[in-house]
Amino acid sequence: MQPGQTGVRVVVADDDVLLREGVASLLANSGYRVVAQAGDAVGLLELVRVEKPDLVIVDIRMPPTGTTEGLDAAMIIRDEMPEVGLVILSAHIAVEHAMQLLASGRGIGYLLKTRVTDVGDFLDTLGRVAGGACVIDPALVQELVDARRRNDPLAVLSPREKEVLALMAEGRSNAGIGRRLWVTEGTVEKHVRSIMTKLDLHETPDDHRRVRAVITFLEAR
């Protein structure tokens, strides 16, 4: 389905009446069929179950608590009617919420309200999601990348140290790593010491640092 294609049935849910009416009007003028509107998550679920739309546009935060009711409703819709496209509108970047949605399958859009300023781009996004695509706001993508970098314990290692650690994970000795990388065993030993220091793996009576380093490597993959 493409933007403006007649027959795309949409339910719009947002507790902000002006925003909801504005989106509904835009869609109606662009060829979509807005079959229902909702101001809360409970009403949204009831309407979707009755209308069985092709696409649902919903705010994450909705009454009564204004936390994640909209998202929760979206996940229920995805579970009950996986063929329905979902476009989530949010005023904030919520990485955890985005990951939940991405894991739920096809036909997903996650957009920041503050960035929905280009009407043509917005309509294009709706059409792509209705057709089964996954469309994520660029700002959210960047946040996901940054979050991964912040949480990556291997980010402190140099490219060569990562190579050495990867070969350690294959069970190679320092001599074997040296032969693989065409460096001396002494050079490998220096890299290994640096890896242990950067990963904060201190020698203890009970733990083998080399094994712990490999476990850290595998967990970060």
Image (cartoon, rainbow, N blue to C red):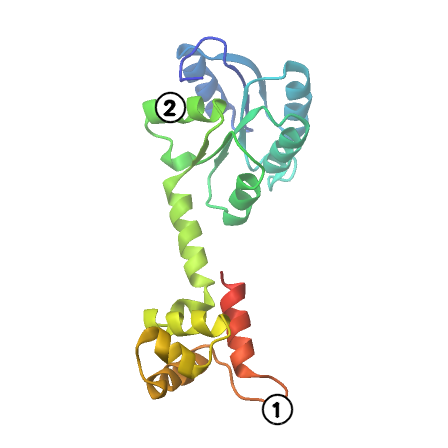
The residue at which mark 1 appears reads as 205
**Quarter of the image containing the N terminus?**
top left
Whichever of callouts 2 and 1 sits on the residue coming sooner in the sequence is 2
Residue type at the position of mark 2: Asp
**Three-letter amino acid code of the residue under disc 1:** Pro
Mark 2 burial class by Cα count in 10 Å: few <14, some 14-19, many 20+: some
Residue 76: x %, y % from top left: 66, 32
| Disc 1 crowd, CA 10 A, few/some/many (<14, 14-19, 20+) | few
- Please state the horizontal and vertical placement of residue 149, each as a whole percent of the image: 41, 60
Which residue is drawn at the image coordinates 33% and 69% (left, top)? 159
Point 51% across, 76% down: residue? 213
Q: Which residue occupies the foreground of this view, 99 or 45?
A: 99
Q: Check residue 147 in the rendering and tell me which mark sits there, or answer none.
A: none
Asked which secondary structure carries label 1, the reply is loop
Label 2: element kind = helix
The answer to which image quadrant residue 97 occupies is top right
Residue 196 at what x, y percent from top left?
45, 81
Name the residue that disc number 2 marks: 124
Q: Nearer the viewer, mark 2 or mark 1?
A: 1
Answer left or right for 94 relative to 183: right
Res. 148 image quadrant:
bottom left
Left or right: where does residue 98 sit relative to residue 158?
right
Looking at this view, is 213 or 57 the one in front?
213
Q: Of 23 and 182, which appears nearest the observer?
A: 182
Q: Identify which residue is drawn at 53% across, 45% down.
A: 99
Which of the 4 image quarters holds residue 28?
Answer: top left
Q: Is residue 213 above or below residue 100?
A: below
Against 110, residue 31 (above or below) is above
Q: Between marks 2 and 1, how big is the CA–CA gap?
A: 61 Å
Q: Is residue 155 above or below residue 36?
A: below
Residue furthest bottom as drawn: 205
